[in-house]
Amino acid sequence: MAFQQRAWLVLRHKMARLETIDSIFTANTDIFSLLTWSSIRKAKIGSLIAVYCWITPLVVVLTSETLSVVPETKTENTTCQNVRTLNFSNEKWVYWRDPVRIQGEFLTSVSIWNSTTIAGHNISEHNTNQFDYYHGGSIQWADMIGLRVALANEPLFRRESGSEICSEGWNCSYVLSFLAPGYKCEELATGVDSKVRDLGDERPPFDTSVLAPLGNLTYYARLDIGDYKNPQATSYPGGRPKQKPPYPRNLGAFRTEPIMWIGYCTVDNYSKPQPPEPGIGDWYRAYTPVILGCEHYEVNYTVQFDWVGERQVHKVLRREYLRRVVNTTFSSKLDPDERLKDRTMAMPDDNYVLPTDIGKYRLTAAYHSIGMSLRQVLNGTTTMPNFNVNSRILSTPLVDRLNYLPPKNFSRAITSMYENMVISLLSNPSFNVVSWASTGQPTGVSKSDPSAKGHPCRKSRYMNVFRYDKTQLLSVYGASIALAVAAVLLGLHAFREEGRMRDMKPSSIIEASRASHLHALNSTSEVKIGYGLVHEEAGRSVRSFGVEGNLTQPERAREP
């Protein structure tokens, strides 16, 4: 409409040839008319409006380019169902004499037991000589989890847990806090002839002289000093002592928890072969002896778990060492009761954990079973020459295959492997320590938490989303609207000058073509016409198209 008003305004005040008039009125629909120079010269503003009409479809093209489909991570802070954690206090009450089933399957312990009673008989609460006591770690723990983790030094996990916790198609992350065993390691000596510090009240059983370069060992681990012995006394199968009661006071007692005394050698370049024979070549310059002492603690762990698809990754955020598993100091003296096969003594004996202290004893037994799996792997020696590795550590990633040495930061590697063992308990929900994070109750093989309380978590997933380029979108629409407003204002200006609204309806064209002098258009294309008052022969005037010389047009103050 604005274009038409400007076209009529031009003809109202200017004379032009017919082809120019055609171009002025059709420039918004015929590209060749738009490119006619005579029409551009006569109707500059109309030509600009026509250009705008032609480029308007570009708005659709340009704005569509602002919308794209991009991959994006959607994150939600919410609660996750079926989150499992570790609750070792379940070891205190879930027991083989009163078995617990969940969905038909028994809960299992990390420990197995001896008893002073005849097989198949229950314990009498009134008989102090009838009690159960520790035998060792269970096969379910030692072989199915502890050894498997040691061989790969990677935690085990249930693949289906990802979808059970996060929901199908989602990844998730959550933080758990729980009490579990852990080793706290300290470096007691570094370098040849360095003095070995005591570990608290405990004195190391060897010094750096047994290690290369002064000695012929590149690895030396004494991890069984003061360890619990089985059998505790001469017994029948099942642990009932052959001697008559009353039984020894310390039968089955946890007197101390073995400290891991570990000596090993480091080198400057682990990727380079090191001197293999004592005293030859660079032997004395190549090896640096290190001695560690690691104590068994109850630790308050804070662990972040991340599930990505069917894979679990964990990160220990914090370790708070609360107490030693058995708070005693090993003594070289022997228990005076010769009926015992395990005559280990420690100080003070008041801190022994006795089978009659049922809850504490079962918890200590669980911690001891887990620690024993690590100690059995690390115990042993590597003797030079010939790299004679007499230890199960050879079957783990903790020893390289070039020089058969542990990593330089061996204490951190020990801690990490042990934590992998502990975390891997979650891979087998039949253990009684595996519990719902919402209630602390054993989960068993159940796939869903009956409490349905959930645990705080963060869910995320990758998804395709629509995204607008806001800058480009606003720029295109802003320019388009501004040009449209300008065109409308120019059209209104033309309407104001004309005094009426003109269009291209047939009735309007007929009305504008009433003059009789228009037959002159047939004679030549050079005739100029315009729109205004046409003077007829009869002396009357009509508002119509007319040829130059027979048409009166109003004068304008300036060129539009």
Image (cartoon, rainbow, N blue to C red):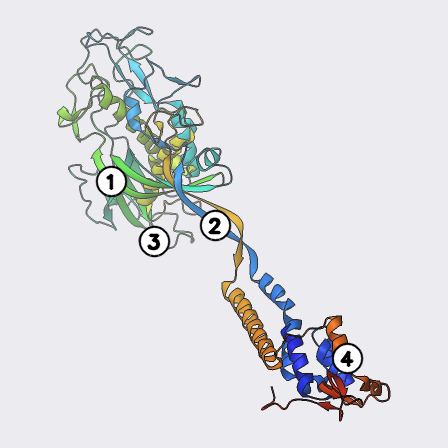
- Seen at 13% across and 27% down, the residue is 348
Tell me which numbered mark, 1 or 2, is placed earlier along the sequence. Answer: 2
- Mark carried by residue 513: 4
Tell me which numbered mark, 2 or 4, is placed earlier along the sequence. Answer: 2
Of the residues tagged 4 and 3, which is closer to the observer?
A: 4
Identify which amino acid the numbered label 2 is placed on. Answer: Thr
Identify which amino acid the numbered label 4 is placed on. Answer: Ser
Give the image quarter of residue 10. Answer: bottom right
Of 400 and 165, which appears nearest the observer?
Answer: 165
Tell me which numbered mark, 3 or 2, is placed earlier along the sequence. Answer: 2
Q: Which residue is mark 2?
A: 73
- Give coordinates of residue 92: x percent, y percent: 27, 22
Give the image quarter of residue 43. Answer: bottom right
Mark 4 and mark 1 residues within 8 Å of each other at the beta carbon: no
Q: Is residue 202 visible?
A: yes
Q: What quarter of the picture does the N terminus occupy?
A: bottom right
Q: Which residue is mark 1?
A: 320
Mark pair 3, 2: CA separation: 51 Å
Side of 78 relative to 301 (left or right): right
Tell me which numbered mark, 4 or 3, is placed earlier along the sequence. Answer: 3
Of the residues tagged 3 and 2, which is closer to the observer?
A: 2
From this view, report whether residue 24 is shown above or below residue 79.
below
Mark pair 1, 2: CA separation: 34 Å
- Seen at 25% across and 31% down, the residue is 258
- Mark carried by residue 286: 3
